[in-house]
Amino acid sequence: MTPEQFLEFARVLPEPLLLVSGEGELLATNKPVADMLGLRRKQLRGKMLFELVTESANDIIKYLQACSSSRAMVIGSLTLRKNDGQTLICRSQGAVIQPWSGKSSALILLRLENRVVATSNFILLNEKIDELAKEVHRRKQAESALKKANQELEIRVEERTTALQETLKELQLTQTQLIQAEKMSSLGQMVAGIAHEINNPVSFIYGNLHHAHKYTQDLLRLVEIYQQVFPNTPPEIQEQVEEIDLDFLIEDITKLFQSMKVGTERIQEIVKSLRNFSRLDEAELKQVNIHEGIDSTLMILEHRLQATHEYPEIKVIKKYSQLPNVTCYPSQLNQVFMNILANAIDALEAAANKDNQKLTNNNPEILIKTEVIDKKWIVVSIADNGLGINEQVRSKLFDPFFTTKAVGKGTGLGLYISYQIIVEKHKGQLSCFSVPGKGAELVIKIPISSVS
């Protein structure tokens, strides 16, 4: 993304956004950032991020390096120096747009949010967690002191302590789920906004292509008539005809318009997929085409399926059956598809790394099958041919906060949230089948009719 493309993209969004290089140079900003600092955007041109914050240059570089090397959004904190001399503590969310390479620096998108606003929703929850943590500690001390005096009281204290620990765990889980929900909501709003902004100019271009092609053909027919009526053209005209290679131009211009039409239709398909994935207006039960949700999710993840210098291309094989429309929560079901497919891609990338070390061939594949079991149920299975998982890991796969990924790579909530959506929200089933060394398969079974 170039600074110009960033400005065009950021202009329609209300969030304070900055585009910075891996060295901290401000490449582009939008108006909300300038308003937050009490400056004009032109006053920010050419500045370094270090000049706008109180943190040390070393800390800023470390944060930008973390953003450059992570595929996930990196959360941080920046204290801005406002034009009036005051400071403003902000939560920052950094995502790499263009990874660092030997030829170019990394491009990093930073989203800023007032720390007071960002944390106000969680202050009360954190206070309760702290209070419960202290209560658990006090109960454990009381348990040790009363153990010899009264066995019955010991049992009651132990039960109370266990209950408080469970409550603490549930509150911590709720806190993390709220953060995940906020991320998904922000992603959905951003996707829907981008789709809307792209759709308008593309529709205008697509609608005018037909007329432009017709007008061009009319002009070419006029030139052809001139050639027939006046076969002996003056030297100046004949020289121009040869210079522009009129015969080739007439033959190629039709192909050119067809190529432009195919391109605009492709953009329209992408916009449709983005809208279908976000489904911001479909939070309630609705009859939907399950295949559209899967295809939209694959469109979002398409960049991860393509070959890179580190990983081979991941081939997606679809074996779709004829499915009826299913009554479900569309946006939540799309989130399940996103979590499962993203995990499958992670597994195949891990397998590719291992195969590269052994210098063996690797043909990563994801197989997606759908079928109707009976009049009440359908099944969607997503399988990969990665390394697979052992029984010990498989038994904990849907537990909250359980992950086999490195620190910073995963929260351990993706499959847990997916399980909640399928089992609790849709009254269905989510199962995993795997043989180590032969990949893994996630099977989703949901009812066709409305969920009570």
Image: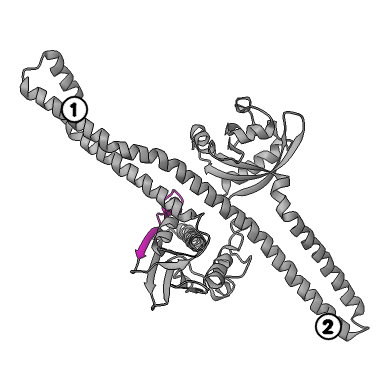
Which stretch did the figure color magenta? Answer: 299-319
Q: Position of residue 115 (x, y in %)?
A: 71, 45
Q: Position of residue 303 (x, y in %)?
A: 44, 50
> In the image, which disc is placed on residue 265?
none
342 vs 83: above or below = below
Which residue is located at x 14 percent, y 25 percent?
223
> Of the residues under marks 2 and 1, which one precedes in the sequence?
2
**Which quarter of the picture shows residue 438?**
bottom left
**Residue tagged 1:** 219
The secondary element bearing badge 1 is classed as: helix
Looking at the rendered structure, the kind of residue marked 2 is Ile
Q: CA distance from mark 2 to mark 1?
A: 95 Å
Classed neighbour count for the residue bearing mark 2: other residues with Cα under 10 Å, few (<14), some (14–19), many (≥20): few
Q: Nearer the viewer, mark 2 or mark 1?
A: 1
Looking at the rendered structure, the kind of residue marked 1 is Leu
Q: Is residue 295 left or right of residue 100?
A: left
Q: Position of residue 173 (x, y in %)?
A: 67, 64
Can residue 137 be seen here? The reply is yes
Residue 271 located within the stretch drawn in magenta: no
**Residue tagged 2:** 155
Q: Is residue 438 left or right of residue 236?
A: right
77 vs 367: above or below = above
438 vs 302: above or below = below
266 vs 136: above or below = above
Q: Position of residue 133 (x, y in %)?
A: 80, 65
Q: Residue furthest right?
A: 149
Which residue is located at x 42 percent, y 66 percent?
385
The secondary element bearing badge 2 is classed as: helix
